[in-house]
Image: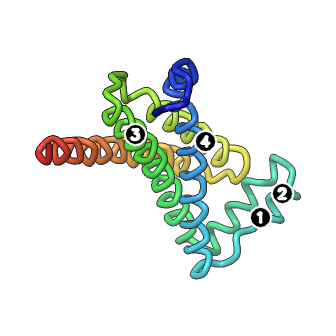
Amino acid sequence: MNKTPKKMTRIYTAVRPALMTIVALFIAMIATSIVHLAFSFVLAPFPQKELMEALPEQKAAVMQAYMTSEPRAIYTALFAHGFGGFVGVFTVLLANRSWDEKRGIARPQWVAPLIVGAFWLYADLSNDLNDAPIGPLWTVLDVLLSLGMAFLGYLLANRVASRTAQSVVKRS
């Protein structure tokens, strides 16, 4: 017997997608950090201290010097940021869709991934323009790659959820 009041269940059902959006963003940040950490073993140390101490107008010069001394670093950053967008969108869509289908809840499944993607792009732009300025060309490339990878995560999560739902129907 379910002891949870119906009203609480309704509130949780309504709030759960927003909570999963926050969780997915956290998971995306962890995934990006892991990729950055993995590449740090083969790259020169990132000039974090210099960037933190530099004035806003000096940050571009610090990043330019680092990118000149370590040209592979920009490609690893592009991959890490794109991978984070992929993981965040994939996680939130798969989690929300599978939970909703299990309970027979019909609601649009594109809203939470759109919110995760928008927050991810905001963070990406903020990082590229303010925290570690990499230049306009690399920023545009980073944003486009993050968008593409997030959309790929959306498509793949939809495909996985559809196949999972089909296999559940076949077993019943």
Of the numbered discs 4 and 3, the one sitting upstream in the chain is 3
Say which amino acid is labelled 4.
Answer: Leu
* Element type where label 2 sits in the image: helix
Pick the residue in front: 79 or 109: 109
The quarter of the picture where the C terminus appears is top left
Q: How far apart are marks 3 and 2 (CA)?
A: 35 Å
Of the numbered discs 3 and 2, the one sitting upstream in the chain is 2
Say which amino acid is labelled 1.
Answer: Gln
Instruction: Give me the residue at 55% from left, 52% from top.
Output: 27
**Residue occupying the far left of the picture:** 170
**Pointers 1 and 2 in contact (CB under 8 A)?**
yes
Res 49 → quadrant: bottom right
* Element type where label 4 sits in the image: helix
Residue that label 2 marks: 52
Residue 20's x, y, as percent?
53, 39
Q: With respect to residue 47, does 102 lie above or below?
A: above
Residue 24's x, y, as percent?
53, 45
* Element type where label 3 sits in the image: helix
Residue that label 1 marks: 48
**Residue occupying the far front of the picture:** 1
Which mark is nearer the camera, 1 or 3?
Answer: 3
Q: Which mark is residue 93?
A: 3
**Pointers 4 and 2 in contact (CB under 8 A)?**
no
Residue 121's x, y, as percent?
54, 39
Judged left or right of residue 86, residue 42 is: right
Of the numbered discs 1 and 3, the one sitting upstream in the chain is 1
Instruction: Give me the residue at 72% from left, 45% from top.
Output: 130
